[in-house]
Image (cartoon, grey):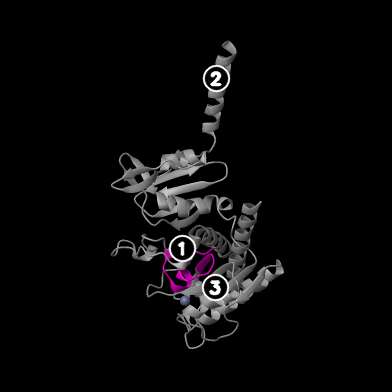
Amino acid sequence: MRRKKALLLLTASLLTVLTATPSFAAVRTITSRGKSYAPLANIAAYYGMTSSEPAKRRVRLQNKWNKIEFQTDSRNVWINGTLVLLSEPARKVGWQWAIDTTDFNKTIEPAVRPQEFLKTAGTRTVVLDPGHGGNDKGTSSPRNVQEKLVVLDVSKRVKSKLEACGINVKLTRESDSALDLSARCRKAAALKADLFISIHANATANRSVRGTETFVLSLPGRYSSNSYGSGKPPVSVNTGNRYDIANLALGFRIHQNLVKATGQEDRGVKRARFEVLRDAPCPASLVEIAFLSNAKDEAMAIDPAGRDRMARGIADGIVAYLADVNRAKK
Ligand SMILES: [Zn+2]
């Protein structure tokens, strides 16, 4: 009898120890007005993280390996220092800060623990897609630096860097030739792409805007980043949504490494329903490497060393994603 009691006590103390370490069974969610939310305190418990409020409107979750910093009443979250836009803001639900459970599952999780979700992802063939070409010049800079030429050069540099690591790489176009949007995804499918990265450059009327932004496909029933709050978000599920988790894991790695290699302003990992992302036959991401309308970004795009830094960042991101996939398969 006494022995049984001791055993029970031992079991109870073991359980206490177990609950103090991260528990990945499932994050505890709450429901409010028919919507499911993951409270930030429950996310902290799930990852075995501490929670603090280091500044106004900031909630920081942290453990030895990862740091997640939410801006409250905002879609901005910095995951290990890299900006990512959630589909919905972190908001007060009852008395606690919480995020949309879908954002937790499809944005936070694949960025924080990619190795847990990529077991079935392929690694054999990388297809790079230099945007525009031929009559379609894309955007251009005040000094007439053309997007179609910059992104072709950057893509070729990414290709040679990856090939130096023994990775099989194909381009959707090898020269300054026209290729329509639907042909790009068909080509990726024909080349049996395991990952697909479309490479573009930006421009806008406001010349002070600069930096890098990386897009992955919007989630069904959720807004795209740049049209938040306008109308109702489409609920349709596109081909590319089969890879929601891997899309984010890939986009996050590329963006993180691109910002690091170039020192560019971090405009975030965002979501959009671009055709090449909607129809992608594999995990996909679209990079906007720089704003040709900004003088500093334009200078980087003109300089071969600048384009090489951009290519280095994209290549490093692809290598990091492939390493995540390989860790997942172990
Ligand atoms: Zn473009």
7 or 163, which lies in front?
Answer: 7
In this view, 195 is above or below 146: above
- Is label 2 in a helix, a strand or a loop? helix
Q: Which mark is residue 8?
A: 2
Asked whether, in this view, residue 243 is left or right of residue 103, the answer is right
Does the magenta-highlighted stretch encompass residue 148? no
Q: Which mark is residue 300?
A: 3
Asked whether, in this view, residue 116 is left or right of residue 85, the answer is right
Q: Residues within 10 Å of mark 1 (few under 14, many from 20)?
A: many
Residue name at image x 47 percent, y 79 percent = 181
Distance Cα–Cα, label 1 vs label 2: 48 Å
Q: Position of residue 131 (x, y in %)?
A: 51, 77
Task: Tell whether label 2 touches label 3 (CB within 8 Å).
Answer: no
Q: Which residues are magenta?
A: 263-286
Q: Which is more foreground, mark 3 or mark 2?
A: 2
Tell which residue pokes out farthest to the bottom in this image. 135
* Sequence-wise first label, 1 or 3: 1
Does the magenta-highlighted stretch encompass residue 271? yes
Q: Is residue 304 visible?
A: no
